Image: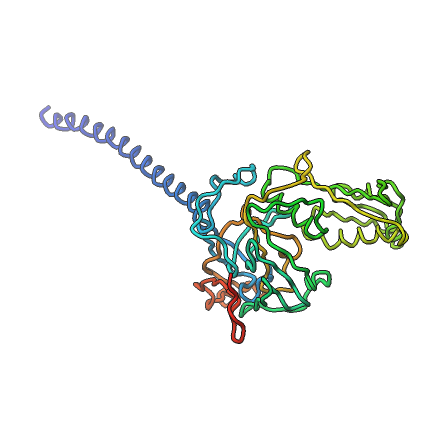
Amino acid sequence: MSEQQPKQAAQPQDSAAQGGAKPAEKTGLLRFFREMGSALVMALIAIVYVIQAFQIPTGSMEDSLLVGDFLLGLKFVYGAPLLPYSRELGVTRRLPAVAKPKPGDVVIFRYPGTDAKDYIKRMVAGPGDVVQFVGNKKLLVNGAELILPPHGKYTGGNRADPRIVNFAPLRIPAAGDAFCPDTMPVREFLFFKTLVHQENPAKRVSMHFDLYVDGELANNAPLNFNGARLSLDDLQDGKFIYKNEMTRRTEVFDFNRVDDWTMLDYVLEVIRRNFPPDKSVEIRKKMFLGNDRIERYTVRNDNYFMAGDNRDNSLDSRYWGYLNHNFVKAKALILYFSYDNTGPAWKFPANIRWNRIGKLIRSWDGESEGNPKIKY
């Protein structure tokens, strides 16, 4: 009996030890989830307000940035949105900015067209500046030539659109500027439509056209357009669909696509040619925000003119107009990885561009040998 007593006494000690392990396990799990939650919250805050990772998908910034470059952009520099996805909900308030975008900065922004992707371009002019393209290879800002960045280039590629050559002077709107869109030329009219969309992303921005012949409304007048019969009513709301009797093909123009202003100019010119020279032909434009006609609009944010360093292969402000500050996302900072995906995948280590990793993405102020620095 005396030998069995120690065994019986030990049993409650074992059960006590087992019972004590459960609170310790719970404490460990709670600590793990608490630390993981804190890390996720910090990461979310960093993603929303501090930094953004971005990959270069096209050659529009070559050779400053290459396809396969991975970079980090600082969101807080230009002022991050107050809340995640607030822009899509129509809330345009932002946190205070450290600095405003300045000409020469490489900027990450949301594309202002229907394709809601992030783009990256170089800002070449800011609010109040006047931009003009002369010929294929000369960009003037406030009358002074802006030299292409050291790694920029002209290639004569598929974006060397002849309708963009000799781009007439264009003033970049600043906050507080007021406009009457009805009186604008076609290019400025469509560029302004893009601006209004960026400042009011939760509302529908539309346009309407009226044809007047000798002062009389003639929207239903039969017109000939490349072999097709139509009226100006077919062009309303920016969509123009007709069957080309010459080619037997259905042609579609959608001028709500922000890079098609040159085609709208062409369509309106063809319509004017339907009438003899002694006729007074006028096409009046209207713009609507929701159901309300915009007769006068005051700009709320500064705007910028963006261009790719690979000037002939860049879908930039020459096509879609102004970049409103509401759509600015981050200032490009540094390359953290670069990979040449043109080579075979099995050569993976050799495809890494080691010499580009860690390179800072620098601004370009237009200064070069023999050309004075442009003052902004």
From this view, report whether residue 221 is shown above or below residue 320.
above
From this view, report whether residue 13 is shown above or below residue 91.
above
Q: Which percent across, then down, holds residue 116?
A: 60, 46
Q: Nearer the viewer, residue 102 or 14?
A: 102
Query: Which residue is drawn at the image coordinates 71% and 47% (left, top)?
Result: 183
Query: Which residue is drawn at the image coordinates 59% and 44% (left, top)?
Result: 198
Quarter of image, res 246:
bottom right
Q: Which percent across, then down, holds residue 123?
A: 55, 58
Task: Tell me how many marks there are.
Answer: 0
Q: Which percent across, then down, holds residue 307?
A: 59, 60
Name the quadrant of the N terminus.
Answer: top left
From this view, report whether residue 248 is shown above or below residue 82.
below
Which color mode does the image show?
A: rainbow
Q: Is residue 189 left or right of residue 44?
A: right
Q: Which residue occupies the extreme top position in the image? A: 1
Q: Which residue occupies the extreme bottom position in the image? A: 370
Q: Nearer the viewer, residue 105 or 142?
A: 142
Q: Nearer the viewer, residue 117 or 131?
A: 131
Q: Which residue occupies the extreme left position in the image? A: 2
Q: Is residue 83 left or right of residue 266?
A: left
Q: Which percent across, then down, holds residue 311?
A: 62, 64
